[in-house]
Amino acid sequence: MSNENFKNTPLLYTGQNPQSKLNPTTSQSNKLYCTKLKDSYIIASLYNSDYFIGIQKYRNGAYYAGFFNNKFIKTGFGLFYKDSEKKNYCYGLFQKGKPNGIGIEQFEDGSFYEGQFLDGKKNGVGQYFMKNGKIYQGNWVNNY
């Protein structure tokens, strides 16, 4: 990962990390960064040249914990709480900041979907478990 993405980013912690995925002879692998975005901030640790792992906290109380690419976009496995009460969440694979691939989406009423996502929408094979006990299994296109 280039340091250009972390310019003017405050350094929160430097320490020894024998499990580092970066070159263990440099201190680059031992830094924890914090950066502010438009509506949130990210605290992250470098993982390798293309990805880092961290937490993104939003002003409304929502947050994401998981992998980011070096442009601060959710990429890889993660958990995204959509509200501060943690009643609505999505976890699974993310790409371009949205659920893509296999994942689970839990809703406030207790119902949930497990299956495939494309650009943040239910798309492909999946199951929707309703709070009344009914289950819909089948193909989804654009959340329907």
Image: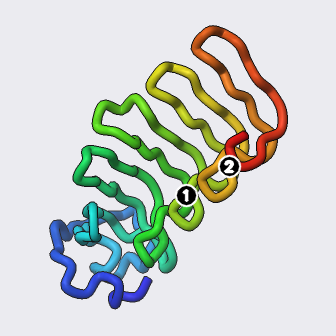
Q: Amino acid at mark 1?
A: Lys
* Residue depicted at 35% across the width and 81% down the height: 25
Snapshot quadrant of residue 28: bottom left
Q: Give how far across and how far down residue 89 sits, in percent.
A: 46, 37
CB within 8 Å, label 2 to label 1? yes
Q: Secondary structure at mark 2?
A: strand
Marks 2 and 1, Cα distance to the nearest angstrom?
Answer: 9 Å
Residue that lies at the very extreme toward the top in this rendered image: 132
Compared across the picture, whether 89 is left or right of 30 comes to: right
Q: Give how far across and how far down residue 130 sits, in percent.
A: 63, 18
From the viewer's perspective, is residue 57 above or below residue 83? below
Q: Give how far across and how far down residue 11 sits, in percent.
A: 17, 74
Q: Which mark is residue 37?
A: none
The reply to whether residue 67 is visible in this rendering is yes
Q: Amino acid at mark 2?
A: Phe
Read off the residue under disc 1.
98
Q: Nearer the viewer, residue 65 or 125?
A: 125
Badge 1 crowding class, 10 Å Cα cut-off, few under 14, some 14 to 19, many 20 or more, is: some
Compared across the picture, whether 8 is left or right of 4 comes to: left
From the viewer's perspective, is residue 72 above or below residue 142? below
Q: Secondary structure at mark 1?
A: strand
* Residue depicted at 28% across the width and 79% down the height: 27
Snapshot quadrant of residue 128: top right
From the viewer's perspective, is residue 130 above or below residue 88? above
Badge 2 crowding class, 10 Å Cα cut-off, few under 14, some 14 to 19, many 20 or more, is: many
Compared across the picture, whether 123 is left or right of 110 comes to: right
Q: Please identify the quadrant where the C terminus is shown.
A: top right
Q: Please identify the quadrant where the N terminus is shown.
A: bottom left
Q: Which mark is residue 117?
A: 2
Q: Nearer the viewer, residue 59 or 29?
A: 59
From the viewer's perspective, is residue 127 above or below residue 8? above
The tag earlier along the polypeptide, 2 or 1, is 1
